[in-house]
């Protein structure tokens, strides 16, 4: 009998908030999907008073995280892709439009239900037909049996398992359980785990500064889900953690900053040197493989 699986549905609203922010970027389908959920008039614009310096720095963080996954996928060149906890990202749709990929996009049932309603109108706006195949499937990543069943849907060949914005919601024991599941799948299939969630804990003063800068609702959300506590103590500590789970760091992925719309906006409103903004190492994207 399966052990009881924790309810992660309280995390789902953050996916909509993130989509609203990304509407200001060039991320494929972000603005189109946000328009369907919020309406065009509710979306941020470059001159919007809500688009503060802090907003742009947060957006830069999330946009960099998004493109780092794409960079890693290009590095690996694997056509079978399983995305975990994808939220309202349409990376899979964009990929199968131009590549012969088999892509399974997963999240909790309530997210997938909404995402399916968005997919149909998005498809109607396209002139071209997809080259690859996209499936949207509900999946709680902590349900190992359901995870294995999803993995069996892929055609033969190695698998790229990808995620962003997931591990910070998992406690250490949950991370270890997920690592064990992913390791089993990769042992059977071959391939890599690409995770953009190698976050390290902020210094105390940085945590206090962040809490003061974000809205009370965001601050409460981060506290309720113990996001800071769930981060790794250091990058070295993260590497040691994964080694203990039978996974090793193969490569790191960093996107070209010239493709970041948020960086353009930051530069356009600042007379200061912005290189320091991109040097802050609070997160990395790692490509992990099974430790032999």
Image (spheres, grey):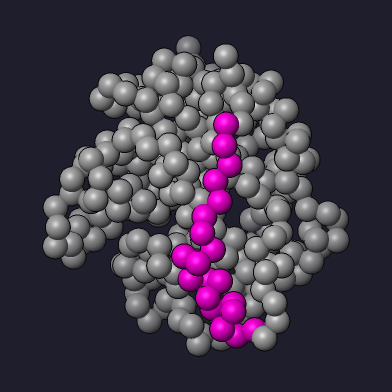
Look at 64% across and 21% down and name the residue there. Answer: 245
The reply to whether the magenta stretch includes residue 262 is: yes
- Horizontal arrangement in the rendering, residue 188 relative to residue 92 (left or right): right
Look at 59% across and 61% down and name the residue there. Answer: 61
Q: Quadrant of residue 88?
A: bottom left
Q: Quadrant of residue 134?
A: top left
* Residue extending furthest toward the right: 205
* Residue 63 spot, x, y in % from top left: 51, 61
* Residue 80 spot, x, y in % from top left: 33, 33
Judging depth in this view, the residue of 271 and 187 nearest the camera is 271
Q: What is the quadrant of the C terminus in the image?
A: top right
Judging depth in this view, the residue of 44 and 254 nearest the camera is 254
Q: Is residue 187 visible?
A: yes
**81 vs 96: above or below:** above
Give the magenta-colored segment's residue range. Answer: 250-270
Q: Quadrant of residue 278?
A: bottom right
The reply to whether the magenta stretch includes residue 12 is: no
Look at 18% across and 62% down and name the residue there. Answer: 126
* Residue 288 spot, x, y in % from top left: 55, 31
**24 vs 47: above or below:** above
**82 vs 52: above or below:** above
- Horizontal arrangement in the rendering, residue 138 relative to residue 131 (left or right): right
Q: Is residue 146 visible?
A: no
């Amino acid at each position: 009998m399966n052990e009881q699986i924790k309810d992660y549905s309280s995390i789902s609203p953050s996916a909509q908030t993130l989509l609203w922010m990304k509407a200001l970027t060039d991320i494929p389908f972000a603005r189109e999907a946000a328009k369907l959920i919020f309406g065009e008039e509710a979306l941020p614009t470059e001159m919007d008073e809500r688009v503060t310096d802090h907003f742009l720095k947060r957006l830069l963080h999330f946009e960099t995280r998004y493109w780092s996954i794409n960079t890693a996928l290009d590095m690996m060149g694997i056509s079978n892709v399983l995305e975990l906890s994808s939220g309202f990202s349409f990376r899979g749709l964009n990929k199968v439009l131009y590549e012969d990929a088999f892509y399974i996009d997963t999240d909790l049932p309530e997210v997938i239900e909404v995402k399916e309603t968005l997919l149909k109108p998005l498809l109607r706006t396209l002139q071209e037909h997809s080259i690859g195949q996209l499936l949207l499937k509900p999946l709680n990543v902590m349900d190992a049996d359901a995870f294995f069943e999803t993995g069996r849907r892929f055609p033969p060949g190695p698998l790229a398992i990808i995620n962003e914005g997931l591990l910070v919601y998992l406690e250490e024991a949950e991370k270890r359980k997920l690592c064990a599941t992913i390791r089993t799948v990769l042992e059977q299939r071959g391939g890599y785990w690409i995770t953009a969630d190698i976050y390290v804990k902020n210094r105390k003063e940085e945590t206090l500064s962040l809490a003061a800068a974000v809205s009370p609702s965001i601050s409460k959300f981060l506290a309720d889900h113990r996001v800071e506590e769930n981060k790794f103590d250091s990058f070295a500590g993260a590497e040691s953690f994964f080694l203990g789970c039978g996974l090793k760091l193969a490569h790191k992925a960093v996107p070209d900053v010239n493709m970041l719309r948020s960086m353009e906006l930051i530069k356009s409103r600042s007379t200061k040197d912005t290189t320091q903004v991109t040097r802050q190492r609070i997160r990395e994207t790692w490509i992990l493989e099974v430790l032999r």
